[in-house]
Image: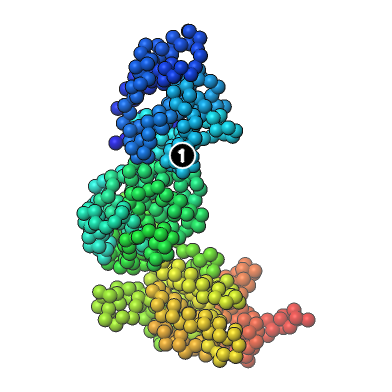
Amino acid sequence: MFRAPRAFGASRPVLPPDTAAALPTAFSELDGWLAARVLSSGRTTLPPERAAALDRAAGGQARRRASARPHLPGLDRVSAAFGLDEPERDLLLAAALVEARPEAARLIAVMGEPGPSRRMVLGQLAALGLEPADFLARLRPDAPIVDFGLVALKGDGPLVTRELAVPADVAAEVLGLRGASALPLRILGDEDRSCPLPPAIADRVAALIRMLALHEGPGAPFIIVTGAVDSGRRDIARRVAVALRPVAVEAPLADLAEPERQVAFRRTVRMNDATAILGDPQDAEGARPGAVLRGLDGPVIVIAPAGTFATVAARFDRAAIPIDVPRSGVAERAELWRQAIPSVVPEDHARIAERFAFGRAGIGRALRLAVTSARIQGRKVPDGDDLLNACDQLRTAQFNGSAQRMTCTFRREDIVLRRETEAELDLAIAWARHGSRLFAQDGPGGALKVGHGLACLFSGPPGTGKTMAAQIVAGEVDYALYRIDLSRVIDKFIGESEKRLAALFDEAERSRVALFFDEADACFGKRTELRDSHDRYANITIDFLLQRLESFEGLAILATNLVGNMDDAFLRRIRVRAEFTPPGPPERRRIWDRLLPLPGARSDDIDTAILSDAFELVGGEIRNAIYTAHLLAAGEGAMLAMRHCVRGLWRELAKIGRLPDRTRLGPWQHLAADETGRSRFAGR
C-alpha cells in the first residue's frame, strides 16, 4: 500500500509509479461526470458552443453519465469512515477534483463566478443539481464533514459565497492518489511484532495482547504505557498497536495544541482506521485530550512518564489499562549493548550499562556517534572508550541553572591523603563502581536491601582536597559531576526549596549523574527548636532532604568545613565518611613533589624538604604558592628555581596571616626578608 511522505500538510499528491499511467483516463472520466452534472442540472444557461463542448467532455451521454456516480474506492472508504450520504459524496468529489485538476476548475467556471482562488463556492452546488440550502445543516461545525476537516468553508460574507476547500490528504484519498497525509502514518508490521521488550514487562504485554485479541472488555481499548524516557515504552506501544490495527498515527500531545492540528490528527486516524498513539501528555499544556480524541472510537495508546498513570487517566477521563515499564537493570542494559555491538568485550558492556541508563534508541544514537569517532581516528570498529565518550556527549542533564557541570581531570594518583582517608576514598570508588550490581535485588548483596545509591561526606578544613576528591571519585567511575548552586535552590518561600531539591534529585537519577553539595552544612544543617513558623518550615526542608537522600539511587557527595553543624540524622545515612585533615610533613613533601615540574624542567636547587617540613600548609595553599613561583620565574624569563618557590611560599604564608620564623628556611631566609620588606613597602 502506498503511503504519504511523513510531514504535515503535504502540498500535493505524490502518485505511486504503478498508477501514474492510468490516471489520465480516470481523470477524464471524472471530468466527464462533472460536465454531465452541469448539463443535466438545468441550472446553467450556456451558449450552444459551450454546451456542445461540455457534452463532448461528458462523452455525448450527459444525462446517463450524470446519474451514474463514479466508482472510486477512495471515495467509498472516506464516505464509510465518516458516514457521508450521497449528496455529501458528490460535494466532496467535485470539490476534490477542483483541488487536483485545472480542467475541473475550468469546468466549474461555467456554473457562475468561482471564489477568488477559483475553488467552488457553496452557491455553485446548484449547477450540480444539489440544493445549497440542504447543505446548511450538513456543513454545521459539529457535522462530520466539517468537524473532521474534510471540507472547510473559506472566506467571509454569505454562506453561498464561501469557498469549498478540501485538504490535500483528503483529495488524495478520494481520488485514489494516496500520496499525501496530514500526519505521519506508521505501517505496522513484523518489525513491530518482533521487537524485543523489557523482560520484566514482556509477559504482561503478551497477556494483554491475548486479551485484546479475544475482544474482552467494553469499548475500544485505551492503554496508558508509563515509564522513563527510552525505557522501551514506544516499543511496547507499537507491539500492542500492531495486534489491533495495521496502521498507527503517532504524535506528541504537545504538537496537537492548535485546533488545526487536532482536526488533522483526528481525520488521519479515522480515515485510515488507525490506532492513535499519543506521547508525553504531561508536557501538553495547551492540548485538551477531549478535543484531540473527539469522534474517535478506535484504540488509543498513551505514552506517559513514570508514576503518572492516575493523573493521565483522570485527564483523559476514560477507563484505562495500565502498563508500567520498570526501570531497566544493569544486566538488561548490558544485554542491549551486546546485541547492538557484540565486538566489544562484555566488561565494557557492563561498564557502560552501569553508568548510562540508555535504552534501545539511546544506544543506537551513541553507537552511530562512536562509529563516526572511531573512523575519524582510522579505526573501523569503536572500542569501549569510544562508546563511553559518545554516551557522555549524548547525556542530557537539565538542572535549569541550579547545577553546573565540573570537569573531572584528576585521577586517584593525583591526590595525597592520610591512609585512613585514602581507604574511605577507595571504598567510595568501589561502591560507586560496583554497588548497582552487588546490591541489586538479584545481586549477591540483595538481601541487605541497602539500595543502589551512595552518599559520601567529605569533611575538613578548606584546601585539604575535598573538592578534588569528589572529582576523583566521579571521574574514576565515569560519572558526570554537577556542583549544586545552593543560592538557586534554597528559597525563602515556603515549599519552593523542597520542589527544587526534588527536581535536582529526580533529574540526577534520570540522567545518572553525580551531585556535589559544597558547603553542605548550609543545606543539611541541624534541626532547631520550634520558636516560630520559620523554624518549623526550615525543619520541614531538612526532613525532606533526609528522606530523599535515603531513597536517592545515584551518587551524592557532600563537602563541609563544619561537620559539627551537620544534623546527626544525615550522618547516619552517610555510607562513606572521609575526614580530610591537614597534611603532615611527609604528605606535604609528596604534594610539593607532585605539583612541581619534573626534574629537568626545574632548577636542581629546589629543596622540597625545606619547603614542606617546617611550614604547615594544606594542599590548596601549596598549590597557590607554586602558582606564584611560576609567575615570578616567567617574569624573570628563568627556569623555576628555589628562590621563586621561597617567595611564593612566603607570600602565601603572609596572605593567610601565619608568618613563622624565617630562619626555618635556612640559606634561603634572606629571600623571605626581602619578600616581607616588599610587602610592607607595598602596603604603605
Residue 252 in picture, x, y percent from top left: 43, 52
Residue type indicated by callout 1: Val
Res 39 quadrant in image: top left
Residue 181 in picture, x, y percent from top left: 40, 38
Q: Nearer the viewer, residue 592 or 517?
A: 517
Residue 339 in picture, x, y percent from top left: 26, 57
The residue wearing badge 1 is 146
Quick one: which residue is furthest to the right in this view? 684
Q: Residues within 10 Å of mark 1 (few under 14, many from 20)?
A: some
Colour scheme employed for the rendering of this structure: rainbow
Q: Nearer the viewer, residue 348 or 28?
A: 28
- The image quadrant where one finds the C terminus is bottom right
Q: Tell me the SS state at disc 1.
A: helix
The residue depicted at 53 percent of the width and 64 percent of the height is 400
* Residue 611 relative to residue 332: left or right: right
- The image quadrant where one finds the N terminus is top left
Res 606 quadrant in image: bottom right
Q: Is residue 486 visible?
A: no
The residue depicted at 52 percent of the width and 80 percent of the height is 541
Q: Is residue 49 visible?
A: yes
Tell me: residue 593, above or below residue 17.
below
Q: Report the label total.
A: 1
Tell me: residue 219, above or below residue 448.
above
Quick one: which residue is furthest to the top in this view? 49
The residue depicted at 37 percent of the width and 45 percent of the height is 269
Tell me: residue 650, above or below residue 333.
below
Q: Nearer the viewer, residue 110 or 313?
A: 110
Q: Nearer the viewer, residue 161 or 388?
A: 161
The residue depicted at 49 percent of the width and 29 percent of the height is 132
Residue 206 in picture, x, y percent from top left: 23, 58
